[in-house]
Structures are given as C-alpha cells and as structure tokens.
Image (cartoon, rainbow, N blue to C red):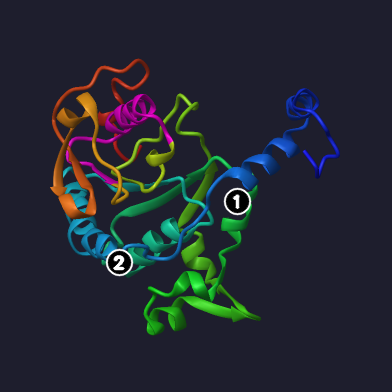
C-alpha cells in the first residue's frame, strides 16, 4: 500500500480489481519462494534410484511413450530443474518425459524460466554436475538451454483452478502447510484424481496424508513422505476419467 501511495484497504482492493500487474506484484511479495536444488537430498535420491526407474518400467510395460512429472508450487524453478537434471541422466530415450512446473506467481515463473541461480541455491549439486550443466554469468550460474527446455512452466493455483494436469509423479512439497486442513484434503483429493494407479505423490517432510484421502494413497517411503496411488476408484466431477489417461 505504501508503494502504491494508497492509505486505506478499500482503495487498494479497488486497485487490485483493475490492475493485474499489481495483483502479480502482491502475490510475488507475500508468497514464500524458498528453495534450492535437490532440497532434502535423500528424497531426490529415492526419486532418482527407485521412483523414476519404476515409472519408466511401468510406462514401457503399458506401451506408453510419455511420462509427466509435475512440480506444484515450483517457486524459482530449483525443484523442477532438479527433476530435469535427473531426466537428462536417465537412459530413457524411448520415452518422452515432460517436467511440468506450476506456481501462482507470474513474476516468479518468469524468473524461473531464465534458469539463472545464485550459487547459494546450488549447494547440493556435485561439482561435476555444475561443470556439465551450468555456465557462470558473473556471480550467478545459468542452467544450459537443453535442460531448461525439458521444463514447461505454467501458471496454476492449486486452490482455485478446477483443472489439474494429469501426471505420473507429483511433487508438492512444503506447500500444503499454508492451507487449512479442509483445503489440504480438497487438494489431496484432486492430486489423487490426477494420478493413475501406481502414480506417485511426494509431500514435504512436515506434511502428512489427511482424512479420507488415505485410502487413495499408500505410504511407500514414509520418511521421505512418498506415497503411491492405490487402485481405489475416485469419483470427482470433471476428474472421473483423468486417472486412466496418464501422460496424455
């Protein structure tokens, strides 16, 4: 309000209604966008060594040629780019693997698309990987373009948007903690509808499965909050057929 030279809430709310740029600025200011590459390395180790190979195997067995990995609440891009680095290192040339990255803040998404990072956010990346995939630009490092192209950034609000992308793996870490219990249950239900049977959901270490949604997920790696989608059918308007169309 001070930056806009507005003294009362009513005037600022009116400005938000007519100025989309101001809404983006507000969201970028009040949203928490803390992340780094391979945050919680043990979690990414399980994803790399166990989850991704299994998803690839299942896709081949089902004669599918595509996998979708969704980073929900991607912030400045460290998480989806971490997935992209692992995808690039996979022996999976026979599969099309899309890393989808979504966030509520358009300015943050624009920053993420540049692939430019401070070294402080790259502490968990081994030096050989930095040398292979990043190029120094002054005090920062830019991820090489072929890996950046593996990630598709989109604006998405997991609370208000009705359409959830179909995905084989969903990472939504340290996001649900900012929602009420009822809102968490609603979001988890939609994640369940967006995943096929045996699809994978990864939550943050301080987050847990809640309510009736437990029947849709089986804990596979409890410490890492990694859950496997069960075969339990789900009835959700607009999502009934989604779980049968992975990677579409």
* Mark count: 2
Question: First in sequence: mark 1 or mark 2?
Answer: 2
Position of residue 90 measured from the top left corner of the image (x, y, whole percent): 28, 66
Pick the residue in front: 117 or 153. Answer: 117
> Going 25% across and 17% down the picture, which residue do you hit?
235
Residue 80 occupies quadrant: bottom left
Q: Dot 2: what SS? A: helix
Position of residue 55 measured from the top left corner of the image (x, y, whole percent): 21, 51
Q: Is residue 8 magenta?
A: no
Q: Residue furthest front?
A: 7
- Tell me if residue 79 comes above or below residue 157 in the rendering: below
Q: What's the magenta region?
A: 179-202
The residue wearing badge 1 is 108
Q: Dot 1: what SS? A: helix
> Going 17% across and 48% down the picture, which residue do you hit?
58
Pick the quarter of the image with the C terminus. Answer: top left
Q: Are marks 1 and 2 in contact (CB under 8 Å)?
A: no
In the picture, measured across the screen, residue 232 lies left or right of residue 73, that is: left
Neighbour tally class for label 2: few under 14, some 14-19, many 20 plus, Cα within 10 Å = few
In the picture, measured across the screen, residue 216 lies left or right of residue 129, that is: left
> Going 50% across and 34% down the picture, which residue do you hit?
157
The residue wearing badge 2 is 41
Position of residue 24 measured from the top left corner of the image (x, y, whole percent): 67, 40
Position of residue 187 measured from the top left corner of the image (x, y, whole percent): 36, 30
- Tell me if residue 200 comes above or below residue 182 in the rendering: below
- Residue 244 disc label: none
Pick the residue in front: 180 or 69. Answer: 180
């Amino acid at each position: 309000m001070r930056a806009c030279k507005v003294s009362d809430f009513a005037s600022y709310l009116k400005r938000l209604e007519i100025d989309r740029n101001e809404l983006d600025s507000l969201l970028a200011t009040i949203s928490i966008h803390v992340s780094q590459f391979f945050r919680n390395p043990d979690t990414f180790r399980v994803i790399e060594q166990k989850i991704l190979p299994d998803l690839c195997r299942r896709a081949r067995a089902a004669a599918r040629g595509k996998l979708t990995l969704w980073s929900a609440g991607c912030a400045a891009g460290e998480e989806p780019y971490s997935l992209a680095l692992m995808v690039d290192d996979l022996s999976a040339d026979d599969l099309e693997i899309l890393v989808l990255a979504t966030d509520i803040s358009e300015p943050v998404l624009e920053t993420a698309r540049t692939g430019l990072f401070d070294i402080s956010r790259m502490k968990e990346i081994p030096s050989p990987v930095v040398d292979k995939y990043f190029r120094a630009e002054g005090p920062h490092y830019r991820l090489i373009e072929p890996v950046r192209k593996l990630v598709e950034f989109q604006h998405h609000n997991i609370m208000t948007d009705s359409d959830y992308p179909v995905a084989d793996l969903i990472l939504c870490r340290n996001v649900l903690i900012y929602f009420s219990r009822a809102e968490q249950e609603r979001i988890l239900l939609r994640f369940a509808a967006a995943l096929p049977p045996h699809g994978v959901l990864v939550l943050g270490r301080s987050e847990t499965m809640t309510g009736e949604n437990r029947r849709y997920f089986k804990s596979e790696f409890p410490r890492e909050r990694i859950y496997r989608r069960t075969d339990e059918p789900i009835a959700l308007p607009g999502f009934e057929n989604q779980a049968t169309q992975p990677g579409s």
